[in-house]
Image (cartoon, helix red, strand yellow):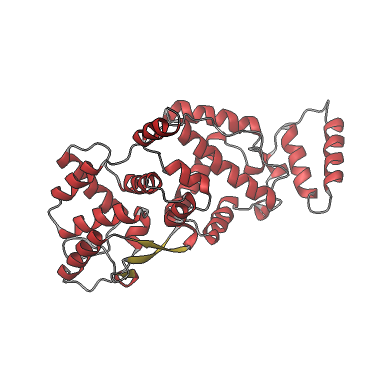
Amino acid sequence: MKNQIINEIQQKMSNILNNEQKEKLTEVLKYVFFNIEFRYNELLFENERERIDYITLFISAKKIEGCSERTLIYYKSTIENMITSINKRINCIETEDLRNYLVKYQSINNCSKITLDNVRRILSSFYSWLEDENYVMKSPVRRIHKVKTVQTVKETYIDEDIESMRDACKDVRDLAIIDFLSSTGVRVGELVKLNKADINLQERSCIVLGKGNKEREVYFDARTKIHLKNYLDSRVDNNPALFTTLFKPYNRLKISGVEIRLKELGKMTNIKKVHPHKFRRTMATKAIDKGMPIEQVQLLLGHKKIDTTLQYAMVNQNNVKLSHKKYIC
């Protein structure tokens, strides 16, 4: 309770004090309130006219930055779940509250460390924004460090897997999707947003709209060109979307539609863990194994940081063995 009052006073004074004055104010308040006990009175802190919907403001800021609707929904639900669980006003939540929440979250949901760190990262982004906007004095997440995770080698498709899925395709659309994902390495969200007008069959290239509404050019191979052309020639609808549903009213294909279809192909071919993102990882791994500079792979995948590309691209262990024989033995 005492800390909440100090926080309230600090926030009210933050716009007229410099950092040195803020630190002195904190020191004085702690000294003055040291032996004083307070009883909570909602009216002391809560003025309905001054209440701010911090979450809506934060989500709006992220939307302007170019975050997808899916990401915004995930951000919003993560923050709301935290606030509901801790049951304090946003600007009164402290580091220990968040630490206890993360421990409780992992225990209840039995989630991985990667998922837990994603929650921590979202809360950190939220409170960093509040701090930048002077809604809080200092982010309580600042002292909560990144959750250490075990680096695992994620699976990629072998050539036989992709060929088996191609053989299992009963429709030219599905064959075109398999080849397009394998050849370009685009995100599934980018795939479903593509229009026919974005495709240049002659140059075997297309423009995709990636994260942050950034456009980039990607390329596909001759086989993809043939199957893509066959699919487009077979279309009887006027939908501008590159990929549509198989039956009327021929709506634009959604992410869930791609995921479900690939999962079905996985069951038909007895291939485990078939999902769109695995094609992206496979393409990146093959490109690096064949000697493509990592910077160029980064551009193809649309990564802002090269570290992200390195996480996607898992070096083939057989190539490591051959290199060891060549350079070490």
**Residue 77 showing in the rendered view:** no
Instruction: Name the spot of residue 282 as percent of width and height, x first.
Output: 34, 45
Instruction: Name the spot of residue 265 as percent of width and height, x first.
Output: 19, 45
Q: Which image quadrant for residue 31?
A: top right
Residue that appears at 18% across and 65% down: 231
Vertical arrangement, residue 241 with respect to residue 20, above or below: below
Left or right relative to 23: residue 329:
left
In-front residue for pair 292/122: 292
Instruction: Name the spot of residue 323 as percent of width and height, x first.
Output: 41, 35
Left or right relative to 302: residue 230:
left
Instruction: Name the spot of residue 23 as percent of width and height, x first.
Output: 83, 40
In-front residue for pair 264/174: 174
Residue that appears at 63% across and 53% down: 52
In-front residue for pair 62/101: 62
Q: Quadrant of the C terminus?
A: top left
**Residue 144 showing in the rendered view:** yes
Q: Which image quadrant for residue 314?
A: top left
Q: Which image quadrant for residue 326?
A: top left
Figure label count: 0
Left or right relative to 203: residue 126:
right
Return the residue found at the far left: 170
Residue that appears at 73% across and 42% down: 44
Vertical arrangement, residue 294 with respect to residue 39, above or below: below
Left or right relative to 117: residue 257:
left
Q: Quadrant of the N terminus?
A: top right
